[in-house]
Image: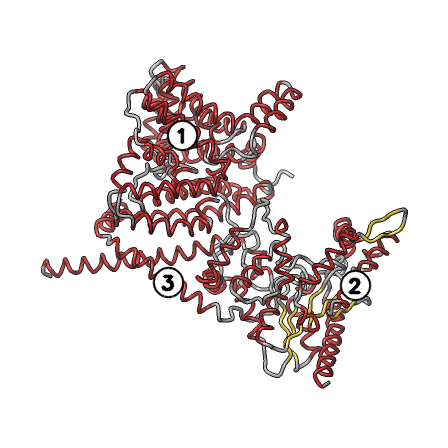
Amino acid sequence: MKMKAYLENLRQWALENLEPKLVMVGVVVGFLLCVALGHYFARQNLYVNYHRLHPYISMDTQFLPTFSNLYELVKSRIVPGKTLVIVGGDSVFNGQGQTVDKLWSDQLQKDLGDKYSVVNISFRGGRVFEGAYWIYEALSKEKHDVIFVANAFGAVIGIPCGNTPYRYMYWDGHYKGFLRDFKAREDFIKFNSTLLLDQFQKPLDELYLCMQIDNYLRFRDLWNVVSYRLFSSIWTEGTAKDCLVPRILFEDKIPLSDTTNVRDSDQSLWLNTVRKYSQPYYQTVNGKLLPNHYGWREFDLLCDCAVMPDLRSNTLVVSTGVCPFYFDKLNSLEQERHNMVLDRAFGQYVRKGYNTLIINNLETDDFIDAVHLTPAGGYKVASQVAAKIREIKEKQQNNNQK
Amino acid sequence: MSVQTQNRTQKLYAALFSMLLGISMGIFLNYILYRMSMPTKPFIYAWF
Amino acid sequence: MIFNTYWFFLALFPFLLIYWAVPSSLGRMVILLIFCAVFHTHFAGAAGVIPIIVLALISYLCGLSKNRLLIAAGITVCVLALCFYKYLFFISDEVIGAVNPELGRSFKLIFTSVLPAAPPLAISFFTFEFVHYLYEVRKGGEPIKNPLHFALFSIFFPSLVAGPIKRYSQFIPSLEEAVKKINWRSMALGMVLVCSGFFKKLCLADNLTSCTEYFADKFELIPPIERWLYLIALSFRIYLDFSGYSDIAIGLAAMMGIKLPSNFNWPYLALNIRDFWHRWHISLSTWIRDYVYIPLGGNRHGMVRTICNGAFAFALCGLWHGAHWNYIAWGLYHGIGISVCLLYPKVLGPVGLKIQTFLSKFWFIKWLMTYLFVAFGWLLFFFPLSEALEKFQLLFTFGYPK
């Protein structure tokens, strides 16, 4: 009762003595203070002890790294005299199936040695040239020595301004002026507006507005810092009871999976996934495989507007393939189709000026499911990717000497 | 304390309180912009 | 999404500046009307604005005529419009379809070709306001003669989408007073209320929504104590979401100096169901009381009639929330609850009086009973009947049924 009376008195005092003009001044001051802090933090590296974008610092748990966050992270790995290797791609290159102490990209760093600096900013569920490539493109404005590596499955490539859920990052980079002028990509966006719709089939106006406002106010940069270092404020099933805990305290808990999972995992689900990689590109007519011209025309177009022409010679597209256990379960026509798609797609990459690497010596025990790699599989990939990167570097040096 | 001093102190407290209230609201408004960049849920009664 | 959109923030800021800067009352009203029209068009679409314009015109003209027959016709048109847009599919699927599925399907096909994909935005709210207006004029109240005043009453953006349901006799004088000069105190307090609303919605309600949506289909898998926590989370989810919206609406109006009726008064502190409905969605419950319950006879015609009137009024209240049987069930549930609450001392005689005396000594028991009654009701509100009953049973089941 005393407490209630006290609170009521306090409330009355506050209402009677409120200086409204000072309140409004305070609002402006508080808001502008946040804007200033946002601009400051946008130029700092947010991450501590970084190895990869694990679930607690990525979209899986509603932590959306800003373009600036990743840009500053990658910039912090630039060492004069060393070649920076940016690892992009999807969950395969994110190391799904490998614990953080057995991460393939850390092994890649060891294999490459002192003359290279490796940073892994691949996204689980991302496409080939989403996220990491845009950071690479932004860095290319400053003429750093960079090689970009990403994994791809056959002809799956994604649209140049990003598919859900990572397309926010494209527009973030676009409106903040990080990305370069790339006419082929801009034309693609202009002429394919039907692809740029949200889950309710409405235009992405809110996304564009958000990123445009953020360019000036930098609220996402500020509150990402708060969420990472002080307290989070969003409940997700991943964080659950720890939803208020700052993300810096979360460990990278991606588990090491048993190789027997390959045979125990949901085989029909994975088989359908493997089939989907090649289905759009060839159709079966009278027992023969004929190319789907529409699918290949689209792939050709996307190849042209995914990566800027001058950056392709420093871009390496890697195929880690499908687990032999699953590949053997496909019928002969499906196997043939799978191989034809891989050959044609990677051949197209080479013709467009990309570097490619097809890894085909992985065994069943190198996989945890149809596509993701165990540490052993990751190490095999690391050694081959390292060799290819050195080859690319050597070719560049020879070209420069000429 | 004289009445004048008391009044001045009251006014100072009131000014400080108003300013702090305003600053916290300004900070919160900035946070709202961030929070809206995450997937948010529609208002329930807007369904009706 | 309405208030929690970047479009709204970007549009509101310059509007408020212009509104405050314009020196004349008429100028302020015109600016406000333009913004209300832009707001509604943006969120409802050009086609979605037509119903409110048509119904507003009809209501305005019928009100001006002061002809009882015309006014009754106006009320009928408003009610029919609500039924047309909101309940036709319910009638075809659940009413006709329950008796004759084939006939129900035929009607549904007809309705699909006639109706838009979704009912016009805010139709439940603005039809109720027009009915209120016409009913009061029919009773002898003075109609709104100024078309600008009526237009603002119809389309006032803070309360347009989800209330509070305004009373014109309070709104118009408040509007006239507000546009005369800036009220700094009202502006500051309004902003506090807006912030409070967003805090309730974005920081609390949305997190509770994510949590309850995640556990909704895992209800039988979670420990029994967590099922009760789920129930509490569900009850606070809807309270914080809706009272948050109301705070934002009332706060925005206050920033313009306009007073809207309050909609919530700490409903979960209610000590009986009647008290609860004096604290929850106050503008709707008073509307139902004034325009359904009292015209039906209220409690002036004996106990049986009182119970029937109450049950009907609450069933209608439930149906207003959505065109599904579970909403009607929820409404009836509360109607029965209120009847029991009001009549048990009379019906049970001396025993009833003893219970009443006991409860008045132990307010905690009264409070707990009321809160649990309301919380169980939310299961009916959010889930289909069978699922709601299943969850209710699981609350009292120890262990895991499957």
In the shown orientation, is residue C192 left or right of residue A143?
A: left
How crowded pointer 1 is (Cα within 10 Å; few <14, some 14-19, many 20+) is rated as many
The residue mark sitting in front, 3 or 1, is 1
Query: What is the C-alpha distance between the residues marked 3 and 2?
Result: 56 Å
User: Is label 3 on the same chain as label 2?
Assistant: yes
Indicate the quadrant containing the N terminus of chain A: top left, top right, bottom left or bottom right.
top left
For image coordinates 77% across by 67% down, the residue present is A351
Please, what is the three-letter code of the amino acid marked with disc 2? Asp
- Residue A365 is marked as 2
Q: In front: C115, or C333?
A: C115
For image coordinates 29% across by 30% down, the residue present is C169
Tell me the chain of label 1. C
Tally of numbered tags: 3
User: Is label 3 on the same chain as label 1?
Assistant: no
Please, what is the three-letter code of the amino acid marked with disc 3? Leu
Instruction: Report helix, strand or loop for mark 1.
Output: helix
Tell me the chain of label 2. A
Tell me the chain of label 3. A
Q: Which residue is mark 1?
A: C56
Q: Residue furthest top?
A: C301
Q: Which residue is mark 3?
A: A32
Q: Is residue A272 above or below residue C269?
A: below
Instruction: Report helix, strand or loop for mark 3.
Output: helix
Query: What is the C-alpha distance between the residues marked 3 and 1?
Result: 42 Å
Query: Looking at the picture, how far across and down is residue A384, in whole percent?
Result: 76, 73
User: Is label 2 on the same chain as label 1?
Assistant: no
The residue mark sitting in front, 3 or 2, is 3
In the shown orientation, is residue B48 left or right of residue C177?
A: right
Label pair 2/1, CB-CB below 8 angstroms: no
How crowded pointer 3 is (Cα within 10 Å; few <14, some 14-19, many 20+) is rated as some
Query: Looking at the picture, how far across and down is residue C37, in whole percent?
Result: 41, 40
Residue C313, image quadrant: top left
